[in-house]
Structures are given as C-alpha cells and as structure tokens.
Image (spheres, coloured by chain):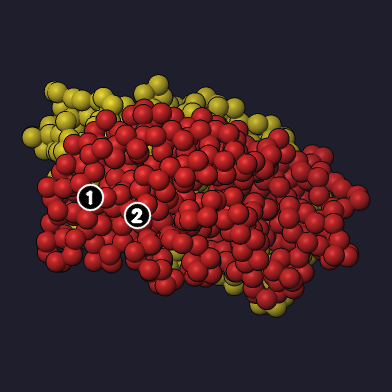
Chain colours: A red, B yellow
Amino acid sequence: MNAAINGFDATPEGELMVGGLPLRRLAARVGQTPFYAIDRERVRQRVAQARAALPPGVRLHYAVKANPMPALVGFIRPLVDGLDVASAGEMAVALDAGADPSHVSFAGPGKRDAELQQAVAAGVLVNLESAREVAVLAEASQRLGLPARVAVRVNPDFELRGAGMRMGGGAKPFGVDAEAVPQLLRDIGHAGLAFEGFHVYAGSQNLKGALIAQALRESWAMVQRLAADVPAPIRHVNLGGGWGIPYFPNEQALDLEPVTAALAGIEAERQRDWPGARLALELGRYLVGEAGVYVARVTDRKESRGQVFLVTDGGLHHHLAASGNFGQVIRRNYPLALGRQVNPTQTETVSVVGPLCTPLDVLGERVDLAPAHEGDLVVVFQSGAYGASASPQAFLGHPPCAEVLV
Amino acid sequence: MNAAINGFDATPEGELMVGGLPLRRLAARVGQTPFYAIDRERVRQRVAQARAALPPGVRLHYAVKANPMPALVGFIRPLVDGLDVASAGEMAVALDAGADPSHVSFAGPGKRDAELQQAVAAGVLVNLESAREVAVLAEASQRLGLPARVAVRVNPDFELRGAGMRMGGGAKPFGVDAEAVPQLLRDIGHAGLAFEGFHVYAGSQNLKGALIAQALRESWAMVQRLAADVPAPIRHVNLGGGWGIPYFPNEQALDLEPVTAALAGIEAERQRDWPGARLALELGRYLVGEAGVYVARVTDRKESRGQVFLVTDGGLHHHLAASGNFGQVIRRNYPLALGRQVNPTQTETVSVVGPLCTPLDVLGERVDLAPAHEGDLVVVFQSGAYGASASPQAFLGHPPCAEVLV
C-alpha cells in the first residue's frame, strides 16, 4: 500500500482503493458512474472510535438522516445501540434494517398525524416537539390500544457555540422551550402517555470538543432541573450529537478528550441519581461522513481562455453540498483527487464541473490534480453523509447516481 | 373577484383562486399537500405577452429545464415554436409531449456519448459545446446513417451584465470560446455534420431590459463575424433568453421595450443577410415562473420565546430555492400568503418552516400573514420554475410533492 489519502489506501501505482478494490475496478463493478461508495470497514472503525470515547454504558445511536441508504443502515444497525429517525420514511428504513423499535426514536418538528400514528403502531419512542403532538398521540394510543412512548425534546435556554448549524437556544421551531416543559410534562401525565425521558439537540457539525463538552454539561444540568416534574421515572436521556468532521484545509479533526471527560462526569451522576436510566448520544455525519466518496467520470476536458475544465458526469444534482450550494455562504472545495493518481508528483490546476447548464454546478474550483483526460475518475472525499439523499437528483433530467457499500 | 395577489384572483372572502378554483377546493381535488399548482391560463397569457414582444418571424422556444412537468410541457408545446432540452431525460419529455424533433435543440456541457447518440437518432439539433462532441457525433451519424444536426454554442467574448447567473464571457465550461469557433466550424465541415447555426446564452434571471438588449446586439454581431467560416448556410440562430421575473420587493418586472427594439433591428438584418435563417429566443422561468404556486399545510402552530412558527408539511425538500439554499448568498423571502385570506386587514408576524430537522428549512422568515391555525394552507408564489425538479425530494424521507396543471 502506498501513501494514504483522506484515510483511504492507494495501490503502489497511486490508485485510490475503496473497500479493498482499486477504484477503476470498483467502477466497473458498479457498472455506472457517478456513484457513491461507502467503505464498511471505515464505518466499523469509526463506530469503534466513537464508542471508545463514550463511558461504558452510554448508548450510541445512528442518526439515519445523515445517510439513509438501506444497505448502510442495515450494516450499522448491529454496530450501534439504536437508530434515530426524522420521518416515517426513515422509520420504515430503520425497521426494515431490523431495528428493535424499543431502540428507535423519532424526532422532527411538524410530524404529521399519520406519522405519529405510525410511530405508535411501530412502538418507537416519539420525541415530542409540541403540545399538539400530545393530543394526537393520546388519540392514536386509544385507537390502537398501545401507550405512546414519548420523550420531550427540549429547546434549551442556552446556545451551543461553534456549531455549523444551531438547533437550540432562542426562538426555535425545534423542541419545546425549556420553560414550557413542566406544563408539557403534566399534560403528558394526564394524557396517559408512556413518558421515558428527554432529548436535547444543540447543534450540528461542531469541531470544538470543548464546546460540545460544555453543551453536554449544560444540557445535562437542564435535564436535571426539568426532572422535578416528570410524570414517570426517567429511562432515557438523549443528549444529542453534532460531532463534526473536517471538510476544508483550515479545519482540524474533532478532539474528543473534553467530550469524554464531560460524559464521564455526567454518567457518574446518572448512575448515582437515576440508576434505571440510560444516556444516549446520536451521531450521523461523524460515523459515516468520512467513510464515503463520490465518484464521477470525466466526460470532456475543455480549455477555455487559459483555464482547464474537467466536465464530469456528476455534479450538484447528486452532491449539492460539495457544489457549495446547500446553505453554505462561501463556496469551498471538498477534498478532491484523480482516482488513478491520488498523490501526484506533477499536478495541473483545473476546475471540475458537472453536466448541468448552470454555473452553480461546480465540484472543484481551481484544484490541483494529476493531469487528467477523458474517461478518468474524479473522487470527492468526505461524501458519506448528506450526499445522494440531500441532492436534487431530478434536476435537469440526468440519471440518478448509484450507491454501493463496499 | 376581489383584489388580486401576485397576479392571481381571490374570492370575495379573500381566498386565493388558482386555475379558477378556490385554494381549499383545489387542495381537496389534489388530495394531498404539499403540491405545486401551475395555472395554465397564466402560462398562456405569458406566452402571448412574450410573443408580442418579439418581432414577427422570431421563434419562441421553451427551455424545459425551468419546469419539466410532463403535463406542462405538453400544454406549452403547441403554444411555442420549439423546445430546448438539457439532457437526454429532458429530450424524452419533449418528444413524449409531441414535439417535432426538428424544433428541439439539446444544449449542455459534458453530454455523454449515449446522449449524443440518442440525439442523433431522435433527429434533434445538438448545440455543440466542445470539439470532442464533433467526433462522437460523426461516429453516431455513420452508425445510424443519419447526419447529426448541429449548431455551435458560442462562449461569447463579452459578459451579460445584470444577470442573476452569468453563463458566457471569460473562461467557462459552457460552449466554445468565440476565438476557437472558426476551427470548430472547419472540423464540423470535415466531419460531414449537418451544420445549422449558432447558439449564444449569456446569462439568466436578468431584470434589466436594456442589458438584455445590449447582450442580444453583441451576440448578433458576434454571430455575424463567425458566419464568415460556416460550412453551410445558417438556418437557425438561438440568441438565448435569461428574461427574469421579480421575486423580492425591491425587484421590478422586466421592461421589454428595449428588448423588442433590439430584436427588431437584428431581425431586419437577418432578413436582409440570411433570408433562409430564423432567429429564436429560449425562455424558461419567464414563461412559467409566475404561473405557479407551492402550497403547504400548517401542521403545527408553535410559539417559542415570543416568536410564532407555522410548521408546515412542505419545505426545502420540495422548494429548495424558496428556502434560500440554492446558490443564494443572502436568504430573502419569496412572496407568501395564507391561502384563505390573501389580503388580510389584520396580520401577525410569523416564520413559516418545514418539517425537516434543520434550521435551513425555512419558507418565510418573519413574514406578515393573516393569523393562521393548524390545517391552514400557506402559499409560496413565483414557484412555477425551478421548484420540484430542483429540490432534494428524498431528503429526510418525507413524501414527494404533487404537481398539478389547472
């Protein structure tokens, strides 16, 4: 094996290896480009790494939204302690993957009545996000003869700093404001729902371990205050996730030491105060994001007024985030390489674009790659999360991408 | 009829009318929310308006990419003189809609070999974007025994100012640099392809008529220069489109007078110099954008720390552009209204959000609507173009939206 790139191996000749296969052989096996490939061994290693950072007894959940590819969810399900879903559609993926409903939880603002009924029928835990959901669940419980299992998703009275996206603190559509939780807990008791605990999710894509640790401590303290009003013993506390991965040269991998230290203290208090309860963390992007690549083929090599464009068959319709058009304020290149030569001694500066008739369709702007020609494969790293499912695949009528787990 | 809103009528009680139906009845007819509804009468009127701005004899094409909904393409096809497509997928929609292949043209960087072969077999006009395409088309022509019909898409040596997106001028992946066109024309002649003319597309979403007029004049002058080297008489010149529609309060509808004046001059020269040729303009967004609404239902009305959130069953997974996450640098609200009261005397300030677990899922931030409750319909105007097909519908596993033509 040659020098690695972004955590993947390469052949002695410098070709990227994914799932033990040289990339061109993998592409031939897939039978089409573009495709996403998720390396199962890297997922397994990353799950082990996350587990090692958690004190014994703290549960590790996978947030299906990061990548709902059925084969991946089926692979990761036995490696983790639970699956978190954000819709009835994701719930179906989790159940199809063989998840035990007692370890599936469902969060999301604006759950439709039909979704809430499906959740009760499935027996999954519903993270309540509004008083309205209590009434709908009570009715569904009565109709189905099953008590709805619920936790309260709390909109904290603090903000997680350093997160790529903040999802708690201030006025938010997510969860129930901390100050309104005592009344909601009473409503849950009156409605006869099966209360199990709390859910707090402060933000996502955070690369500062100390800030995640601080949010965990504050979340835990808030949950302890809210526990004064619970209608039944607490069995489950989901303290969120938001562990980030580095995408850009100025970003560094998350330092988990402060997170581990914070969780050790919290878990010790949990054992002392609530021996019948379990803590859980939910991670999505962190578990799968670095394990995946997006692979497109160079359709045309064009020079225009001194610039080289590699026009590929892949683009923003499959990988909106890499094009920089999914909520990013400033477009930055995801890490890219030419598949047959990932650590070139000689490079040229090229722009990698897609087949769409729009200047938004850029995968790499002025990146240094091995000199490329038509038929070559271009690889976008850090593509295991928020890829195919987060992209407008029908845009401009091009074929959908393939997805493989290798 | 009551006061109109964004060009739509309302009932005397203030309910939005689309396609002659009050919105709640239309929603009941569709049978689900969210949905897009395109008003065919407004499309017809807009096509007539565009035609009135074109000198007699100038052809009007519809750019399918703006909205490839099959029923809409079928409706608009007999109203226009041709359809422009950006992929083999869109070509199939155009042909299914009954388009005459002689009035279909196919543009796009990075056309795959298979797509080029499909285009030759279909008999549509291929807008060449690179020297590579000449070779692939020559081979396909020979294999199929049909001469490939081609025009040259030129990357101009000027830029269209004022466009929302620039697609010509400077180094670009689109088209062939003007200075490289003479050589390409010789290659086309040697390869025996059926040369028909030129295509120039300077940019999109332009609201300045004077700037569009200037780009038309410059495009025409460039085409006249390039005509010195054509291998066959020019039959077709597509001068692009890019006519914008106003989305935000500070934007004004396009003034077409300068465009009409410029085209009159160009068309007079065309008649004098190339009596066997025809000019064409291709319009997408301008023909259908204002004719469409996106309709979502309020699932939950939540108050959080003094702010009201209307959580709806629709969001960025169906309407990425309205969420402000499709290449926009600054998020601005599309025009919104509550369906049952579009011109309220009393309003409240609310944020309209979707069901996704992400702070990106916002349809309206602090907008003034009639006071709303659960079950109400929220309408996003200016949604007839770049809606369903330009959105990540699979994101988070929610159901796809419906689309109707009424």
The residue located at (51%, 30%) in the rendering is A161
Image quadrant where residue B145 sits? bottom right
Q: What amino acid type should be assigned to the residue bearing mark 2?
A: Gly
Q: Which residue is mark 2?
A: A276
Give percent across and percent down for residue A347.
87, 48
Q: Which residue is mark 1?
A: A232
Query: Quick one: label 1, few (<14), some, or many (20+) residues within 10 Å?
Result: some
Asked whether the viewer can see residue B264, the reply is no
Asked whether the viewer can see residue A342, the reply is yes
Q: Quadrant of the N terminus of chain A?
A: bottom right
SS at circle 2: loop
Give percent across and percent down for residue A108.
34, 48
Residue extending furthest left? B12
Of callouts 1 and 2, which one flags the residue occurring earlier in the amino acid sequence?
A: 1
Q: Quadrant of the C terminus of chain A?
A: bottom right
Q: What amino acid type should be assigned to the residue bearing mark 1?
A: Ala
> From what the image shows, is residue B113 above or below residue B334?
below
Image quadrant where residue A272 sits? top left
